Structure formats: C-alpha cells, structure tokens
Amino acid sequence: MINLRPDLALICDWIRPGSRILDLGCGDGSLLAYLAANHQVTGYGLEIDPDKVARCVEAGVNVIQADVDEGLRDFDSGSFDYVVMTQALQALQRPDEAIAEILRVGRVGIVTFPNFGHWRVRLALATGRMPVTPTLPDQWYDSPNIHLCTVDDFESLCSERHWRVLARRLLDRSHREGLRNRMGPNLFSEVALYMLQAPEAH
Amino acid sequence: MGEAENGGRDTDSVGLVTPRRIRIERPLTLDCGRSLPQHELIVETYGTLNAARSNAVLVCHALSGDHHAAGYNSEHDRKPGWWDSCIGPGKPIDTRRFYVVSLNNLGGCKGSTGPNTVNPATGKPYGPDFPLLTVRDWVRSQAMLADALGIDCWAAVIGGSLGGMQVMQWAIDLPERLRHALIIASAPKLSAQNIAFNEIARQAILSDPNFHGGRFYDHDVLPKHGLKLARMLGHITYLSDEAMRAKFGRMQRVNQFSFNFDVEFEVESYLRYQGQSFVDRFDANTYLLMTKALDYFDPAREFGDKLSDAFARASARFLVVAFTSDWRFSPQRSREIVQALIRAGRDVSYALIESNLGHDDFLMPIPQYHKVLRNYLDRVAREAGA
C-alpha cells in the first residue's frame, strides 16, 4: 500500500473487491485510485476544491465537482455498494442529514471522524482553552470543523436514528487499536471509523 | 495541403494553415428522410497523424463556428482561429501529440456543402431547398470524414455548446469510434427558454423583406437586418448579466440623453457592432439550420426520454465541464448529463469552472479550465501512445 493514508488503508479492508463506491470529499483521489488498481473497484469521488479536482483528473480518477452538503441529491437511492466519507463529517452543515443521505445512496456507509472525547481535548478544555491536538491541528478561528463530536455522541446518534453499526474501529493517531483504546475508547481513541447501514437496508 | 506550418508568429501557435476540401462520394441519408448523394466538407488539420492512427482528435464547432479553429490562414489575419487559445503546440489540445481535425459542418456557410453552395440539380444555390439537419446527421457526416482520413477511432471528440451535443451523439451512435468524449458548456437538450430565444432569432430572419423565402441569393441581396437582430439576441445569451455590467454598465457615449433612437449606451453600440460584423461573414439560411439542429437535439427521445439509457450504449470515458456564470447552458444542465452518465455506469469526471463572462467562457483561456483539459488530455495522449 504505497502512500495510502492509514485510515484509508483500513477502509480498504472493509470494501469488497469489484464493488461500486462513492467517495465524498475524495481529495486527490488516492483511495479510489488504490481501490481501482488493487480491488477492481469502480466509482466516483465528490470534491469541491478545484485544485484537488484537477489532481483527480490527472490521476484518471472519476471526480464530480460538487459540495457534499448538496451534491448527494443527484444520486439515486441504493446506487452504490459503499458511500465513504473520511474526516469530513465534522465540517458539514448538518452531519446527521449527510449520514442519512449517505445511507440512502449507499447500501453501506463508511464514515470517519476525529474523536472530540480524546483526553488531550478534554485536558485542553479543562484548562480553559480550545484544543489544538495532532488530529485537530487548527485554531478555533480558522478551523473548518464546525460540528465536532465524541465517540459516545456518535454512538448515541446512531441508536437514536436506528442506524445499524456493522463495524467500528477506534484508533490512536498511529491508527492502532491498542489496549487503552479498547478499555476506554471515548477517552483514548483519536480517530473513529464506522461502517453503518440504514435500518431498512439488508 | 491542410497541414499546419509554423508561420513564426508565436511559438505556441500552429502558425499558417490552409484549409482543404474533402469530397464524400457516398450517399448520406438524413433524419428528415432526404439524402445527399455526395457532399463536401472543408477541413483544417493540425499536428501529425501517428503511424498507429491512434492520436486523432475531432473538434466539433458550435452555432457560428467553422473549420478554422487555430492558427492563421494568411499573414494578414488579425485574429487566429476561434479556439486558438486551446489548440497548438504545448496548449491543452497539444498539436505536438495530437492530430487535430476541425471541420465546417455540413450545412455550414464556410465552404462545406450547405445552403449557400450550388445545388448540382439546379445550378443555383440550395437556399431553402437545403435539407434541415440534426446533430445526428452531422455525426454521420463526420464519420464519413473520419473514413476518408483513415481514422477508425478518435482518441477524443471535443466540443463546446452545440459542439458538445455532437460529442454526446458520437458517444451514443458510434461508441466504438471514440475513446474519450469531452462535453463543454453543453446541455442534454434545449429548454423551452432556449428554444424561445432561437424562435425569435428565426423570426427576425424570416421576416426580413430581403430574405425572399431563403432565395435572397437570386435577388442579389442579403437579409442583413434579420441576421443582425438574430446575432444581437444571441450575444445577450452568451454573456452573463455580471459581465455586461462590468463591461458596459450604463456607460453612455455622451454624458446626456439625446432623446432619440441612436446609439446612446455602450451596450447598444457593442450589440450593433457584433450584429453588423456577423452579417458580413455568416449565412442566414445556415443560421436558421443551426438553430433548428439545436432545437431538435434530444438523444434521450428514442430511449423513452431516459438519457441514461442512451448513454448505456456509450463506451467512451467522459469529461463534462460547465461554467458558473453560464446561464444559456447552466451548470445544472451539465449536471443532468453527468447524472445520466453515472446512472449508466459510465466513467465521467465533472469540473465546474468559476467564471464571469457567461456561455462564451468556454472559448476563454481560464487557468483552471485549461488545467483540467490539459490534465485530462495528457492521459488521453499517453493512452494513445502520443
């Protein structure tokens, strides 16, 4: 796995070869390019940034220039095996509506987000400051993150909306699932990966 | 002839080009039911066809375009071809790698068989006897041209606006004859508003006393007034409100009202100039024919109005490009194309280019636009071994 971000590499383990995927906020298209080359996966990326769109085109990845907040309505229900959104949930206007849309368009949804319940975050807040951590490196005033949540918040949203959690991985920032992460996931994990399904889906 | 030589003007220009005439001796059956026993197409080519014949690119023109897409026809030309910003050595459609073919479509007025050429049956210009054409007819004619040039499969077919419609029709009708389809500032069919604008343009021409039912050649006059109005109207739809405001605002030639109908505002002067310069270079019958081809274009029609079913036949990879300030064929129209391609499971990328000018932006060298084209066509060239 050359140059693939560790969280993306973990997502690849979840995706069946030969499936059709939609990658929301696909960046330079590295996940799609990797999956196409190694797992015969076909699909499209959604990306709003013009430079990244041009890079996807350069890499031969199918990219649709659109905003995730409004871009999903163009897609038919159940038209993808997987809809993936990595590290973008917390930057959306309505993450809950976005996940509902993800689970409408995809038979399975995969989302990842930084855990706001991590002890570094809690420590910063306890000392009266907004957290600046390795996984949340921005200052409060220039952060794209407007809807941060903790692992426990996310779990409670899932159960409230009856989304089925098919799998979850709660990792430290080296993307390991160490003992501490298993003992106190909401305190020790920095990155959360969830595989979800709508209640009516099978 | 027809090969480009560098006239030494700019290093990224194809230089001096000489158009050539290609005679198609095979009969062409048209959608209207009539057929042309033979026809001629006027063509410019830039770059060199490689030994594998794999690097040919077809450029399809829009309503008022023609075969002269790049370079200069003489040392005295003030302006280069209509898409010179995009075609040339080192430009997005790189003539060091591609063999670029640009034609004047059948029914055009720049030398290809059309209303202003002589009907062999009568010895006089066809005029209104020239059949009305569809985008599909053009694709059939262009395929005959490809045969004549020995090109089995285009590396890419590229076009903006009405040109983009030809690209879509190529991909649907002759899927095995193109590897890539680049659809720029186009639409899957005209809206009622688009057709309405075309109808006013046609009425302007048809009601000009000098039109003579299309036989104005016989009367040695031109329906200049009607054609000019049609072009003025067209120009409004090619520009955004914002661009017109920026370019002209409410600027007046003199600083007070003259209380008559002479040119007062700069925008009036611009439109009159655009209209006037058009009548000297364009044929009214061709204008009518082009607007009808636009109105008729609807590839989904024979697929139960499902564009995705039409695209299910295609096998090319697609690039769709739209411009934020284009209201004639707005980004939403391009999204319809993209959505249908996704439904059909086709490979497609879609780029939305931030722009100011409007529909005409597809002719402009906007950096992001050219970057996307360049990146896409670089892969096309590599695949073609060019």
Image (cartoon, coloured by chain):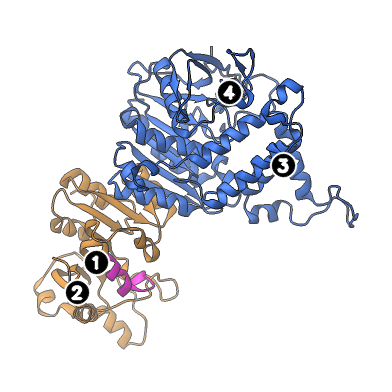
Chain colours: A orange, B blue
Mark 2 — on which chain does it sit?
Answer: A
Between the C-alphas of marks 4 and 1, the distance is 55 Å
Q: Earlier in the sequence, mark 3 or mark 4?
A: 4
Mark 4 — on which chain does it sit?
Answer: B
Q: Are marks 2 and 3 in contact (CB under 8 Å)?
A: no
Q: Earlier in the sequence, mark 1 or mark 2?
A: 1
Between residues A165 and A135, which one lies in front from this camera angle?
A165
- SS at mark 2 in the image: loop
Binning the other alpha carbons within 10 Å of mark 3 as few (below 14), some (14 to 19) or many (20 upward) gives many
Query: In the image, are marks 4 and 2 on the same chain?
Result: no
Q: Are marks 1 and 2 in contact (CB under 8 Å)?
A: yes
Number of numbered callouts drawn:
4
Between the C-alphas of marks 4 and 2, the distance is 63 Å
In the rendered image, residue B355, in percent from the top left (x then y), is placed at 55, 51
Quadrant (top left/top right/bottom left/bottom right) for the C terminus of chain B: top left
Does residue B254 appear to the left or right of B386 in the view shown? right
Binning the other alpha carbons within 10 Å of mark 2 as few (below 14), some (14 to 19) or many (20 upward) gives many
Q: Are marks 4 and 2 in contact (CB under 8 Å)?
A: no
Residue B229 is labelled as: 3
Residue identified by numbered label 1 = A103
Q: Looking at numbered disc 2 in the image, what kind of residue is underneath it?
A: Trp
- At 44% from the left and 71% from the top, the residue drawn is A142
- SS at mark 4 in the image: loop
- Magenta residues span A90-102
Residue depth check, mark 4 versus mark 1: number of the one nearer the observer: 4
Query: In the image, are marks 3 and 1 on the same chain?
Result: no
Residue B114 is labelled as: 4
Residue A62 is labelled as: none
Residue identified by numbered label 2 = A163
- SS at mark 1 in the image: helix
